[in-house]
Image (spheres, grey):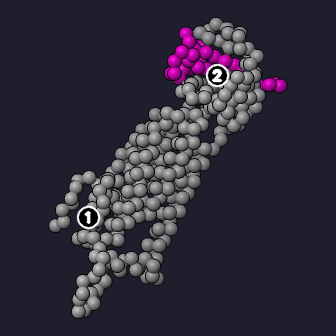
């Protein structure tokens, strides 16, 4: 029996079918762990992460059970899409995004592509021989060579393999596109926030703060513009209750706030002035809590 040279399956060079199988198993298990983490994050923070968790778990199962090359390719596409979404989110607002999770998924996906392709290409027992030994009689083709040839011939097995490849890749492409759409689609609240606003009143700890009354600001996309402001961006999470808004000024950490829209012409913002913690409720009488009420200009 062939002995695997090293117990690590994530970085070793793959030279045999047994090593390819071991690497695929390791990547599949790692992707299952990531799927579990994504599911937990979905329950705690953002339900949309459940889509990624389901896709990662499904791909991990196909890699573990069938050494599926198509599943590995699809997982790589999804991992790349998720990475660029996270990169855009970090650039826009929240630069505290944990990129380690995305790096792990991307590495595991790429490694599973390498492992699954080599698993189906390499013969059992060792690496393919570069030069065939001189023999008096021709040797029959191996089962691996037959399966590879069937994939491009018109045999029933070859047709089934091609159909499976096309279906899995299409499902992965559609899933990646849906993921991009869901994670970046503008919400109704974001549309309602667009335009020019004026600060009508402001309270801190239940006491009126008239100094900034009359301040005007303009919201365009996810940018906020007002006199003296430089590179102020925000991100909303309207599915939370109450809804969240994170406001980032220049290179500072995002300020975690709450917001609500009243009738489309009034926007209420609640923040903690002295800490980075997000308020639990709209409670202006709590020390350090600032409550600002904006009115749409012209209304």
C-alpha span from label 2 to label 1: 59 Å
> From what the image shows, is residue 183 above or below residue 122?
above
Q: Nearer the viewer, mark 2 or mark 1?
A: 1
Q: Does residue 233 show up?
A: yes
Whether pointer 2 and pointer 1 mark residues with C-beta atoms closer than 8 Å, the reply is no
Taking the view exactly as shown, the residue that stands out farthest to the left is: 1
Q: Secondary structure at mark 2?
A: strand
Residue 253 in the figure: left or right of residue 124:
right
**Is residue 275 covered in magenta?**
yes
Point 61% across, 20% down: residue: 270
Relative image position of residue 120 (x, y in whole percent): 35, 69
For label 2, count other residues whose C-alpha is less than 10 Å away and answer few (under 14), some (14-19) or many (20+).
some
Which segment is the magenta one? 270-299
Q: Which residue is mark 2?
A: 269
Is 6 in front, or is 101? 6
| Residue placed furthest toward the right | 298
Near-viewer residue (6 or 134): 134
Name the residue furthest top: 207
Say which quadrant the C terminus sits in: top right
Disc 1 on helix, strand or loop? Answer: helix
Question: What type of secondary structure mainly makes up the magenta span?
Answer: loop
Counting residues from the N terminus, which is met first, the one under dot 2 or under dot 1? 1
Where in the figure is residue 130, as x and y percent of width and height?
30, 76
Q: Which mark is residue 18?
A: 1
Residue placed at 69% from the left, 19% from the top?
293
Say above or below: 19 vs 89. below
């Amino acid at each position: 029996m062939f002995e695997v040279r090293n117990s690590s399956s994530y970085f070793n060079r793959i030279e045999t079918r047994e090593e390819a199988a071991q690497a695929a198993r390791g990547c599949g298990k790692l992707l299952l762990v990531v799927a579990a983490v994504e599911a937990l994050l979905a329950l705690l923070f953002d339900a949309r992460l459940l889509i990624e968790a389901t896709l990662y778990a499904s791909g991990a199962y196909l890699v573990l059970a069938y050494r599926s090359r198509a599943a590995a390719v699809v997982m790589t596409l999804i991992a790349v899409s998720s990475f660029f979404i996270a990169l855009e989110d970090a650039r826009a607002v929240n630069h505290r995004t944990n990129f380690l999770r995305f790096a792990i998924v991307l590495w595991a996906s790429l490694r599973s592509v390498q492992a699954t392709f080599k698993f189906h290409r390499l013969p059992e027992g060792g690496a393919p021989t570069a030069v065939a030994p001189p023999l008096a009689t021709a040797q029959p083709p191996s089962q691996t060579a037959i399966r590879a040839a069937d994939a491009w011939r018109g045999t029933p097995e070859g047709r089934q393999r091609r159909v499976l490849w096309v279906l899995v890749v299409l499902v992965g492409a559609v899933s990646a596109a849906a993921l991009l759409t869901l994670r970046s689609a503008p919400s109704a609240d974001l549309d309602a926030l667009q335009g020019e606003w004026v600060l009508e009143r402001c309270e801190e700890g239940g006491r009126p703060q008239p100094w900034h009354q009359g301040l005007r600001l303009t919201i365009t996309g996810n940018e906020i513009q007002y006199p003296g402001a430089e590179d102020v961006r925000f991100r909303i999470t309207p599915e939370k209750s109450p809804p969240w808004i994170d406001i980032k000024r220049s290179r500072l950490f995002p300020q975690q706030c709450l917001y609500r829209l009243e009738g489309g012409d009034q926007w209420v913002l609640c923040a903690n002035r002295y800490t980075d913690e997000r308020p639990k409720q709209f409670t202006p009488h709590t020390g350090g809590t600032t409550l600002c009420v904006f009115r749409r200009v012209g209304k």
